[in-house]
Amino acid sequence: MRSVSLLELRNLVRSRADIEYDTARHRDASINSEINLAIVELRNALASDGSELYIGRNSWTMDPVRAVDGANYAELPVPSDADRVLGIDFIYNDILMTLESVSLRDRIAFDPSATRQGIPLSWSLIDAETIAIQPVPDAPYEYTIWYHRQYNDMLENDDTFDVLPGFTDWIVWRAVEKIAIRDDLESLKRDARMGMAEAYRSACDSAISRRSKSGHRKDTRGARNRLSSDPIMRWRMR
């Protein structure tokens, strides 16, 4: 991982889009916005591919306590630095299990009598700070919440973002592609898309190589959702 500054990224975007001196049509603030959007898309794509670079996790054991008297669920807190909850695992008889994400309607419809307790089956968001676990657990279980960490936009030139080197190119090319689309520059758009695909593939291959040499235990979540070395436009988030 290396820290790359907003100024460095913006200069690279201007250079590759050949707009170094076009500050009237392509203002710094506009390019900054495209860079920040590209970073968010990159984080989402990496999470979908199973990477834990920007994923947080909180683990603890929860007692089987109903949220409120008569409720048909128990509560877990959303981690304070979470932007989006991705999933919840728990340990049952030394086996890692995954809770199913359900809608609010399904949560409300589930066992409305609230008499049932048992092995947890599902989770849903009640609000930005609270997760519902259903049914009410029949024993203390160890839970792990996987979530997207919050990203704060870079605004100042010396603001930095930690990224694997290859993904720096992806961020730059994604911002260049947006410029090419807005200015209807087909050749630049093709170059940007080719650059994005190559940057993503190379960076993923590099990440996989480092992981295989590290000798660290492979996390179960990573085993279920391996980091893809063949994205084939998986980064297309639009």
Image (tube, rainbow, N blue to C red):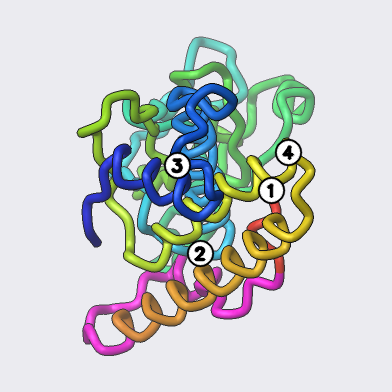
- Of badges 3 and 1, the one in the foreground is 3
Nearer mark to the viewer, of 3 and 2: 3
Residue identifier under label 2:
50
Q: Secondary structure at mark 4?
A: loop
Local packing at callout 2 (Cα closer than 10 Å; few below 14, some 14-19, many 20+) is: some
Mark 2: which secondary structure? Answer: loop
The type of residue carrying mark 3 is Glu
First in sequence: mark 4 vs mark 3 = 3
Q: Which residue is more in the foreground, 153 or 222?
A: 153
Sequence order check, earlier mark of 3 and 1: 3
- Which one is closest to the eye, mark 4 or mark 3? 3
SS at badge 1: loop
Q: Quadrant of residue 183?
A: top right
Q: Nearer the viewer, mark 4 or mark 1?
A: 4
Q: Which residue is mark 1?
A: 237
Q: Amino acid at mark 1?
A: Met
Residues in magenta, as a range: 212-232
Give the residue number, with chain letter if any, for mark 4.
183
Q: Tags 3 and 2 in contact by the CB under 8 Å rule?
A: no
